[in-house]
Image: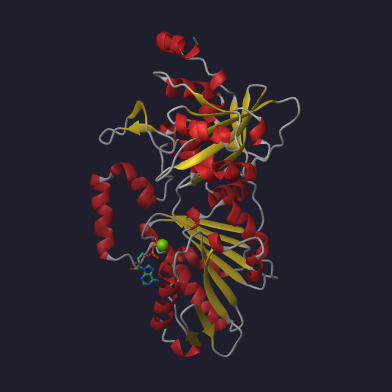
Amino acid sequence: MELEIKTPRWFLPYLEPKRYKGIKGGRGSGKSHTVGEALVEKMIMQPNCKMVCIREIQRSLKFSSKALIESKIQAFGVSHLFDITQNEIKRIGGEGIMIFQGMQDHTADSIKSLEGFDLAWVEEAQNLSHRSLQLLRPTIRKAGSEIWFTWNPDQETDAVDAFFNEAIANNADGFLLSHVNYDANPFLPDELLKEMEYDRRYNSSTFDHVWNGAYNIKSDAQVFNGKYCIEDFEPKSNWNGPYHGMDFGFAQDPTAVVRCWVYQNCLYVDRSFGKVGLELDDTAQFFLKDIPNLSQYTLRADSARPESISYLKRHGLPRIEGVKKWKGSVEDGIAHIKSYDKVVIHPDCEEIAKEFRLYSYKVDKHSGDILPEVLDENNHYIDALRYALNPLIQPSGSFKQAAFNLYR
Ligand SMILES: Nc1ncnc2c1ncn2[C@@H]1O[C@H](COP(=O)(O)OP(=O)(O)O)[C@@H](O)[C@H]1O
Ligand SMILES: [Mg+2]
């Protein structure tokens, strides 16, 4: 059977085998469609090929790549080669199959069901967590198997970006990466072109991210820009700490606990856990599960919730205490964290790592100027960290009166 598929020029190298194939870039560059077509073609040519289309979170098949794949099967006029059921697409005349899954539904055990697969396509890979990437890589282990990623970059520290950036920088074998934008898409519909032109004119601050695939936040708007890194470490007996802090949340925000250490003017964070909607009755148990000896240490919490502190003191966290806030305590806490040579965040601490990435100064919409005001968002784990470090934080001179109130 002859099948003629028009692919954009940038895709040609992807027809050769490579262990890791990444395609990143802005909206409308044809990433999803091109890969969708390539996978259908592969299923036609290799009737025994097993593929899995993956997202970090897949609430239902409606939010998977299944509809796109089905539309390509139809467009190619090859429906007779496929048995399309509710959950999967089977190749008639072979063992080939395509399934659609969310990584968050997988455990270390359940992921093993993918071991015999030839190809995994991770779509919207900017959402892939470090944990999911670590789970997926050794699972797709069949000889000649490949893992494909398509994404619109969000943060430089996202798992997929960190993975490819390091590999490319080291010239590692088996990686192929392209950056494509709308101008590389020969099929760009007029509507999208108009959307792009509108955004270029009226949404200039996000244009580069959305359409050119640039990273999302101006890094100099990040409060802790250049101050932190994600790195594996093991606390040593001569380190100061551990220090524990808790921020209360409930309906929207997580109740969050952070554990940290100080050594040679570096701050080390090795635990960050939290949950939205955590009942007070379940709080101690929830955190003791992950930090078993938490009850033996001072745990500093937001003093705005004296009744919660009193309850937890009597129910599992006897050494919890409230920390007073003072005018400027947020800024003083930030200054303290910035005063370390480096903040080292353990790779397990995804929640606080995310906040370090997103915690930002306000940016003026019109000028793009960065303002000296910190946005009150993405700060639950960071607040917990400030509480943990509270005895080490010096109130700045201009708040002497508040400091006096605090320490008297
Ligand atoms: N191979 C193709 N055949 C037909 N239309 C295409 C093809 N590739 C891209 N397009 C068109 O370009 C649009 C953007 O492509 P898409 O793959 O969704 O981009 P991205 O995933 O990069 O945002 C699609 O909605 C479709 O209209
Ligand atoms: Mg897409």
Can you tell me which quadrant of the image ligand 1 is in? bottom left
Q: Is residue 301 left or right of residue 361?
A: right
Identify whether 408 is placed above or below 189: above
Q: Return the x and y of residue 345 as percentages of the image width and height.
A: 60, 37
Q: Nearer the viewer, residue 303 or 358?
A: 303
Q: Return the x and y of residue 330 as percentages of the image width and height.
A: 43, 24
Q: Quadrant of residue 236?
A: top right
Q: Residue furthest front?
A: 314
Identify whether 232 is placed above or below 41: above
Q: Residue at x 32, y 30 (%)?
A: 369
Residue 226 shows in the view? no
Q: Nearer the viewer, residue 143 or 264?
A: 264
Residue 117 shows in the view? yes
Q: Return the x and y of residue 241 as percentages of the image width and height.
A: 66, 26
Q: Nearer the viewer, residue 387 or 267?
A: 387
* Render colour scheme: secondary structure
Q: Quadrant of residue 134?
A: bottom right
Q: Return the x and y of residue 320 as percentages of the image width and height.
A: 57, 29
Q: Residue at x 29, y 43 (%)?
A: 204
Q: Residue at x 51, y 15 (%)?
A: 394
Q: Residue at x 51, y 39 (%)?
A: 256
